[in-house]
Image (spheres, coloured by chain):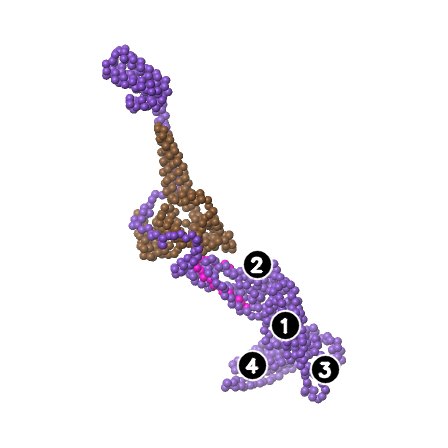
Chain colours: A brown, B purple
Amino acid sequence: MKLLFIFLNILFSQANAQYAEGNYAEAAAQYEQVIAEQPSAEAYYNLGNAYFKQGELAQAILAYERALRIEPSYKDAKHNLLFAQSRIVDNIEDTQSFFLSNWLKAIRNALSQQTWIVLSIALFICMLVGFFLFAFSQTVWVRKTAFYTSLVALIISILACINAGSLHQRDSERAEAIITQGIVNAKSSPDRSGTDLFTVHEGTKVEITETIGDWCCIHVGNYIGWMPLAHLERI
Amino acid sequence: MKKILSILFICSMAFVTYADDAVEFKASAPAQVILGKPFQLTYSVNQRAKDLRAPEFTDFDYVAGPYTSQSSSTSFVNGKRTSSFTLTYTYTLMPNKEGTFTLPPATIKVDGEQYTSNGVRITVLPPDEPTNTSVTSQQSGNASASTQQRKTTNVNAENIFMRTLVSKTKVHEQEVILLTYKLYFAGVDVAQFTNNTRLPEFKGFLKQELEIGEIQTELEHYNGRNYQTAVIYRTLLFPQRSGDIVIDPAQFEAVLRVQNRAQVRSIFDDFFNSYTTIAKPLAAPSVTIHVSELPAGKPAGFSGGVGQFNVSSRISNTDLQANEAVTLTLTIQGTGNMKLLKTPAVDWPEGFEVYDPKVTNNFKNTTAGVSGTKTIEYLAIPRAGGTYTIPAIQFAYYDTQADTYKTLTTPEYTLNIARSANEESNAAVVNNFVQKENIQQFGSDIRYIYTSDQPKFLVRRGQIAFGSLVFWSWYGVPTLIAAILFFIFRKQIKENADITRVRYKKANKVAKRRLKAAEKLLKENKKEAFYEEIERAAWTYLSDRLSIPTAQLNKENIAQILSNKGVSDLLIKEVHRVLSTAEFARYAPTSDHAMQDMYNDTTNIINQLENAKL
């Protein structure tokens, strides 16, 4: 295990050196190797940069998104993701979803799944301690404070657990995807003869809701259409 | 005239071939002959030859031949000597039955080598029928009179007329029709075929004239008579609307040579036949074409084509880079209204810059319609990388033979387009496509990569997987511990509570026992022991009653505790006074009376405290 870490450390440093010299393709390949052994936000972030420098917008966005999956508070990754997204063609605004669900989603995505889990467990233990204080304390104010504190701790713990579960579901479903093909026409049905409904460009984030064979149903903004799975990659 | 032409033709052929020293062996005979009338079959060869073996004339009666004749010529043109030689064998044959027959090829030997001629196809027409009664009587009466009649015949509608021939009278829209104006004549000498022609306008048709070239005559049996016929005008017509369309009569004029009628019979007659030319106006009758609409159910992408077509397609390249041109070539081959075909649309994928297709037509007008190829080159330039599919091109047309719509499909093509090597041009293209309204301002570039000699991510952090056993045990184990602790604590408390309750209940008893002991000591007048017993009785009672250990109680906090329990201030003061007195009196000289008071006071406060609800 120790040996692997030393190896990865060397590989990562080499990739950084390649990047610094402008050999972005080689750097990207080495970052991919590092990620294959040990996925991490930093390696994804660097991979995203290497792709961005090669002009591979879709791959860069994909890597930044994956970095942020692991570490949602990664500021550099957020910045570069926004920067890369400003270069893509589609400007999709989701006007349909309710503002409250957007807020909840934003709160959920603010912390990583691991952080939510740790938070939930910590608060749960807090709740237990508070319960003890409430049950066995002789003093009235201690009992009162302990009761309300443990109640709040329990509620937040449950919410954190729900968030963690939601993130876990998102990560295991991998419903979100990035368009990798330059330009794709979304069809009305999962075959080539379907009517062209709208066009999406490289780098656009879409949500896969259904797959039939090689085709998937995507939601992007307020649009729904079918396209071949080969034209996009799941985050 | 035809003979002259053919001789000229043969001569010219011989001329060329002789110069090339190639052997040309040819059979020739009129294409149409009349039953019972002899005709000549000739075999000509441009080299000295021998041993002609003519086929067996099974369908014809042999009359005479072969007569051999030969001719040679030499000419100097621009100092070059060319010579020709022709050897001709002539047979005279007589048809003995109607029909179309083929004479098999003959063979001949030239310098010991055997050559084969072409076969000859001959149509035997029936002889003239005596339709005209006057002619019949004259013919039956006197053969010479008939000849006379023929020679001086009137130029009437039976001897010379025009016919309008159409290939079809019932057609669909756009279906090709061949219209022919044919001159029929018999027994008259036509000097010139056309003059002052007035063709109808062919309203409602698209006209495509066919070249006729030199007018040639051939024999045709029509209405019981054999006529010389000549095609004067021939055109393809494509109906442009449905309904009954009338083609107006066409006006022609033929120049005829007629023997002067008012001639004086003299011996010079035969030598100096005097002729006059007259212009004979001829009208080709009108004809009605029934044009029906194309049947319902036109397929999508109907090209407007009516006829027989075939399509094929070709693509220049399937693996290319962005910004590299790709050409899709569609070739439509067939016969029909080729000129009116719509150019089929190609459904290029998004991201292709499409240019106007280039159309090359290679048409030939034939009697069956306009045939040939229409080649359409579609040029497009992909502007982004990826894998794209050019869908099949649909070419729908109306098949006149099958009387149905047919749709032809070209294969699909899959293009693998690599990203352009030229990054700048690619970026420029992307920028061209960007049409955002709300442009966000960012730094000019992305932030630099994460660099660290000791990347922290390499230290594997303990991960708690959601829903795993570890995850749930993080909730379960503390809960379990808490539950166990809770029960232990509760048991302890319960037990403690039991002790205090017993002590609480027994407090009065214990106090009474101690007071009794004190009373005994009072009687014995043991002052020190008495006060000690009194003090202990008081403290023990308070401790038991308040469920607070004696060690935690003292004079300072007892007032506060009692006050919190809701004991009246008067009683608290009394308790305080008793405790103080008991402590104080142990070491101070006191009277018996004081000891008795102390005993009473203590009993009193214990009784009062007993009544107070603690």
Q: Are marks 4 and 2 on the same chain?
A: yes
The residue stretch that appears in magenta: B372-392
For residue B12, which numbered disc appears in the image?
A: 4
**What residue is disc 3 on?**
B148
**What residue is disc 2 on?**
B299
Which element carries disc 2, helix, strand or loop? loop
Q: Earlier in the sequence, mark 3 or mark 1?
A: 3
Identify the residue at image location x=41%, y=57%.
B431
* Amino acid type of the residue tagged 2 in the rendering: Pro
User: Residue A194: percent from the left, percent from the top?
Assistant: 51, 54
The dominant secondary structure in magenta is strand
Q: Calculate the distance from the C-alpha at mark 4 to the C-alpha at mark 3.
A: 39 Å
**What residue is disc 1 on?**
B199
Identify the residue at image location x=75%, y=76%.
B133
- The reply to whether the magenta stretch includes residue B387 is yes
Q: Calculate the distance from the C-alpha at mark 4 to the C-alpha at mark 2.
A: 55 Å
User: Which chain is disc 4 placed on?
Assistant: B
* Amino acid type of the residue tagged 1 in the rendering: Leu
Dot in front, 4 or 3: 3
Dot in front, 3 or 1: 1
Which element carries disc 1, helix, strand or loop? loop
